[in-house]
Amino acid sequence: MSAVKNENMLMIPKIKLGIVIDHIPAGDGVKILEIISRYEELKDVPITLGLNYDSKKLGRKDLIKLQLEFLAPEIIQHISIVVPGVTIKAIKEYKVYSKVVVQAPKEIRNLLKCKNPNCITNLQPGIETVFVAVDENSDQVKCNYCERIFDRSELQPIIK
Ligand SMILES: [Zn+2]
């Protein structure tokens, strides 16, 4: 660690224990907050949202801190679908304990709702939705049932 203190870093309070969602492209922090706010289990968790921090990688970035020990894999998956490429860090005793860069999965099972009102997943309760990435570098996904193609970001998440 460099001894030179970065003034911008000082603006973000350090946490003893928690989860930091870092390298969020500026403007996308609210999208992640929106997902987090839908989870009942996170409704009492103290959350800090930082907007427009300087970032070497992104120019400007948003950042979210959650004061909780563990983020459920399902929530991480939802975040990876809506804003791929963010870094999720677990903090223990003020130090980064683990760090993972999340990418959207190739196959998204029962996490997004199909936008086609006539899709069987919307007509018959209990059918799990499945979307498959159209290709590696695209944000488009195809519904396995009605075969329509959507932008991942236009699909509403399913919160169980
Ligand atoms: Zn469909």
Image (cartoon, grey):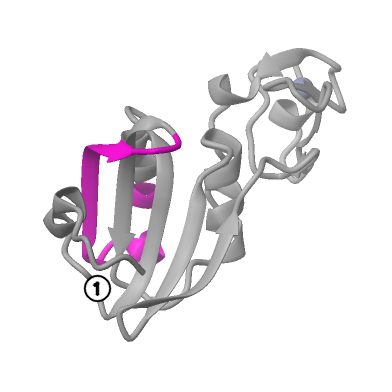
Residue 112 picture quarter: top right
- Residue at screen point 31% across, 64% down: 66
**Residue 155: % across, % down:** 58, 25
* Count of numbered badges drawn on the protein: 1
Q: Is residue 129 magenta?
A: no
Q: Position of residue 69 (x, y in %)?
A: 41, 78
Could you tell me if residue 98 is visible in this image?
yes
Q: Secondary structure at mark 1?
A: loop
Q: x, y percentage for residue 72?
A: 54, 66
Q: Is residue 56 left or right of residue 43?
A: right
Q: Quadrant of residue 10?
A: bottom left
Q: Which quadrant does the C terminus fall into?
A: bottom right
Q: On the rendering, which quadrant does ligand 1 occupy?
A: top right
* Quarter of the image where one finds residue 123: top right
Look at the numbered disc 1 and say if its residue's Cβ is closer than 8 Å to ligand 1. Answer: no
Above or below, 132 against 8 in this view is: above
Residue stretch in magenta: 35-57
Classify the position of the N terminus by image quarter: bottom left
User: In the figure, 15 relative to 76: above or below?
Assistant: below
Q: Amino acid at mark 1?
A: Ile
- Label 1 Cα neighbours within 10 Å, binned few <14 / some 14-19 / many ≥20: some
Q: Residue at x 60, y 38 (%)?
A: 81
Q: Residue placed farthest to the bottom in the image?
A: 93
Tell me, yes or no, if residue 39 can be seen here.
no
Which residue corresponds to mark 1? 15
- The structure residue drawn at horizontal position 76% and vertical position 34%, both measured from the top left corner, is 124
Q: List x then y, in percent, for residue 78.
A: 56, 46
60 and 7: which is toward the camera? 7
Q: In the rendered structure, does residue 42 fall within the stretch colored magenta? A: yes
